[in-house]
Image (tube, coloured by chain):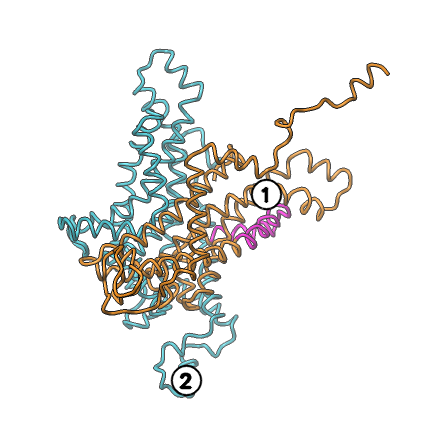
Chain colours: A orange, B cyan
Amino acid sequence: MGLMEQRIKRPDFPATIRAETWWRQYLRITWRNKRVFAAHAMLFLLVLAAVLAPLYPVDPFDQRLAQSLKPPALTQEQNELPSLLGTDSLGRDLLARLLLATRISLMVSGLSVLIACLVGTLLGLISGYQGGLVDAVIMRIVDALLSLPFVVVAITIVAAIGPGLINIALILGLTGWVTFAKLVRGEVLRLKEIEYIEAARSIGCSRKRILLRHITPQVVGVVLVTITLTLGQMIITEATLSFLGLGIPPPTPTLGGILSDAQTFFFSAWWIVVFPGVFLMLIVLSVNIIGDFLRDYFDPQLKL
Amino acid sequence: MVSFLAQRILQGFLAIFLVLSMVFVVLNISGDPIRMMLPPTATQEDVEAMREAFGFDQPLVFRYFTFLNQMAHLDFGHSVQTRRPALDMVLGRLPATLFLAFSALFLALLIGVPLGILAAVKRGSILDTLAVLLSMVGQSTPVFWIALVLIFLFGVIYPVLPPSGYGTAAHLVLPATSLALFLLAGMTRVTRTSLIEVLNLPYVTTARSKGVREHVVIIKHALRNAAIPVITQLTLQMRFVIGGSVVVESIFGWPGLGQLLAQAAFARDYPVVIACTLFVSLFIVLFNIALDLSYSAIDPRIRLWD
C-alpha cells in the first residue's frame, strides 16, 4: 500500500465528463445552431412527406376537367377534399402531385448520389493510393468530365440513351462521381504522408490492409460532406432535365415537369409556378445548409 | 511561360479528346441511330442500306478512328432535323451565348463582389446577415425557377420587360439577371469569407496600426490577397453559367448554343449534340487557361512557370 497504488487508481469522473456517443454530440451541436437545426427539421419533414405521399387521400393522377386551374382553397366542394394548393390545367390536385414529385425527386437523386459515391470513392481511393499510371488515367478522365457542365454531359447522354427514371439516375450517378473521386483522392494523398501510415507500413501491414483499415475509415468525413453537397446538385439537375423534357416523362409528376407545364398558365395560375419552386428550394436549401454544417463539423480547415 | 501555356493547352486538348471518346462510346453502346432517322414504315432493306451509307456496318474500332478523323477536320456532318451542316448551326449560335454568359458574369461581379466586401467589413450587421441569406438561398434555387418568377413579376404582373426574344438591351435584362443571381450568390459568399480571412492576417493589423485609413487598408492591402479564391470560384462557376444558359435560353427564346443543344437532344440530333458539346468544352478549357494566367497577374508570388 503505497504511493504507487494510489497513483494507479482511476479517479471517478462525474457522469457528465464521460465520453459522449457520436450521435449525442451531433444532436447537442445541431441543437445549439438554430439555422442548422431548422434545416434538419425541414429535411426531416420533407422526407417524411415523401415517404408518406401514397397515403395522401387524393389521387395525383385523377383528372377532373371541371376543376381545372382552381386556386388554393380550404373549403370543401361536392364531397371532395379541398385542393389545398390548387389544381393544374387538367384539374389534378397540385398538393398530391407535389408530394409524389418530391418522393420521385428524392428517390432519383438519392439513387444517383449512391452510385456516384460508390464509384467515385472507390476510384478516388485507388487513384490516390496507387499513384502512377492508374492515377494519371483516372485524373485525366476527371478533368475531361469537369471541362463540361454537369447538365450538358447529362443532356448529351440522354440524347443517346433516352429519358426515363432509371436512365436519369444512372446518368446523374455516372457523371457525378468525379467530385467524389477528386476529393477522396486529395484526402488519401494527405493521409499517406501522416506518421501513423508510416508506422503501419513499418510494422509490416500489407498495402491492402493499410488501404482498407487505416485509410478508408479516415475518408468517411469527406465522403459524407460530398454526399450532402452533391445531393443538392443532383436534385437541381434532375429538375432541370425534367423541365427541359429530357428527364422523367409524364404523366409521372416531377418538380421540374410541373414547372414546365406551368409556363403555359402564367397569366391565370400563379400557384403552379410558385409552389413547385418553393418545394424545390426548401429541399435543396436544407440539404445545402446541412452540407455546410457537416463540412465545419468534420474539418473546419477543409475547403471544398 | 510558353512551356506552361503549351502544357495547359495540351491538357485541354487531351480533355476534349476524352470527352469526344466518351460521347462516341455512349452513342455506340446505346444502339445505332438508324432506326431513329427512318420513318417507322421503313423496311429491313432500307435499314440495311442506310446502315451501309452511314458506315454502321463497319467494325467499332474502324468507326472510332473515322469519327476522330472527322472531328479533327471539324466535320460534324449534317443536322438530322434541318439538313444544314452542324458546324454552321453551332457557330451561328455561339455569339448569343457568349454575350449572355459574359453579361451575367459581369453583373454578378459588379454586385456580388462589393456586397461580399461590405458584408465582410460590417461583419454581424443586418447587411451581413442579409448577404449570407441571399447567398444561401441563391445557391439553392434552380436557375429556371428564378427565370420563371422573374418573367411572372416583370413580364406578367408589371409588364415592363419583354419576357422573351433577342435583339435589344431590354431583352437581355431578364435572362442575364436569372443567370446572374446564382453566380452572384457564390461571388458574395466567397468574397466575404476570403476577405474576412485576409483581414485577420498580421500584415493588415500592421497597416492599421501605422494609421492607414480603413478604406485604404481594405481596398489597397486586403482586397488583392482576397481576390485569388474569388477567381478560383469563377473557374468553377463558369461551368454552371454555361449549364444554366441551356435552360435560361430555352425559357427566354434566346437563340444561343444552349437552346440549340436542348432542342437537338430532344430530337436526338446527334451531329448537332456532338458539335455543341465540343464547343462548350473548348470554351470552358480556354476560359480556365485565361483565369490561370490571371493568378500571376494579381499575385506575383504565384508563378505557374519557370
Most extreme residue toward the top, as rendered? B210
Callout 2 secondary element:
helix
Rendering coords of residue A236 (x, y %): 38, 53
Name the residue beneath numbered marker 2. B49
x 73%, y 35%: residue: A199
Name the residue beneath numbered marker 1. A219
Q: Is residue B239 left or right of residue A133?
A: left
Tell me if residue B73 is in the magenta stretch: no
**Viewer-nearest of discs 2 and 1:** 1
Front-lying residue, B183 or A36: A36
Q: Chain of mark 2?
A: B
Front-lying residue, B297 or A89: A89
Marks 2 and 1, how far apart in space? 55 Å
Q: Magenta segment, principal secondary structure? A: helix
Give the residue type that dot 1 points to: Val
Mark 2 residue crowding within 10 angstroms, few (<14) / some (14–19) / many (20+): few
Q: Is residue A207 left or right of residue A116?
A: right
Front-lying residue, B119 or B302: B119
